Amino acid sequence: MANEHILVIGANGQIGSVLVAYLRDIYGESHVVAGDIRIPEQEQGIFVRLDATDANALAAVVAQYKITQIYHLAAILSANGEKEPLKTWDINMQTYFNVLEVAREYRIAKVFYPSSIAVFGSGIEGTALQEAPLHPTTVYGISKVAGENWSQYYHSRYGLDIRSLRFPGIISHQSAPGGGTTDYAVDIYHQAVKGIPFTCFLASDTRLPMIYIDDAIHATVNLMEAEANKITIRNSYNLAAMSFSPREIAHTIREYLPNFEIGYQPDFRQSIADSWPDDLDDTAARTDWGWRPAYDLDKTTREMIGALNQKYQ
Ligand code: AKB
């Protein structure tokens, strides 16, 4: 472990900002390099300004810090992606090709690639099985399906140890999510704690799979630390924790903040949400490397309201 040198690309994003601190606790501060195109408000530990579309810049960081593992978290998400489809495809794919190639050339031991529930689309009613057909409706989803297939290809052709999770919407208080369809489930807590009525961009009964950030981080690191012979899925593992609608999350918030008000004005994100499954079957993750979520909706609401109360005090 002491010899690991980890690069997190997209370190200032919703997952990265929590993952970097978690990895530094495990591996030591000097063993984790945070890379992002955006300079962080507060620099802690090693930070490199990195545009992951620049293959040479990425290779220079990998060589300089003798990187042995890469977590590639940079991507344009589902809702923002629909505003500029071709740019989204270019950025999501170029950055991943650069990671795959640098990993091959520098013999990186392990790569983490986040996939998403956005890989699913029409043809699934209710719960998406691990082997469900993938017919994404967004350019983000298309890029994630392509990324999953390229992961499988680099694994079988070059033996690259790439591990991946199909993340549900992630709920966190540490940083704002950036341009996804599940963002409402974070924004709603901020508004509720500030005492402002919330207008939801999805209809009241739109159920989507979600996960609390601590569970998302544990799943990521547990998958990366599992023995290689336990990993039977080389495109991406379904990952499930909870599933709820805007009406249900509002109901749990009212248990803490009884005056909280919510209204509904569905926009273009409704059709994206409608194309995603209500829930995922994550039996493979549970069986192969022991995945178990610790947070349901009630526990998530308690954590979010507690943390945001402190933030806005
Ligand atoms: C999004 O909404 O685009 C993301 C995701 C589910 O991958 N949060």
Image (spheres, rainbow, N blue to C red):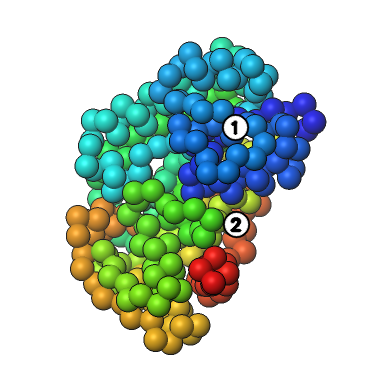
Asked whether the viewer can see residue 185, the reply is no
Q: Which is more toward the observer, 35 or 280?
A: 35
Q: Residues within 10 Å of mark 2 (few under 14, many from 20)?
A: many
* Residue hosting label 1: 47
Residue 214, disc: 2
**What amino acid is found at the position of numbered circle 2 in the picture?**
Asp
| Residue 46 left/right relative to 265 | right
Q: Earlier along the polypeptide chain: callout 1 or callout 2?
A: 1
Q: Is residue 292 above or below residue 62?
A: below
The extreme right residue here reads 2
Q: Is residue 12 above or below residue 246?
A: above
Q: Residue at x 38, y 81 (%)?
A: 260
Q: Is residue 194 above or below residue 280?
A: below
* Quarter of image, res 226: top right
Q: Position of residue 105 (x, y in %)?
A: 56, 12
Helix, strand or loop status at disc 1: strand
Asked whether the viewer can see residue 83, the reply is yes
**What amino acid is found at the position of numbered circle 1 in the picture?**
Phe
Marks 1 and 2 sit apart, C-alpha to C-alpha, by: 23 Å
| Residue 302 left/right relative to 97 | right
Q: Is residue 310 above or below residue 64?
A: below
Q: Position of residue 284 (x, y in %)?
A: 55, 49
In the picture, the quarter occupied by the C terminus is bottom right
Ligand 1 within 8 angstroms of badge 2 C-beta = no
Number of on-image labels: 2
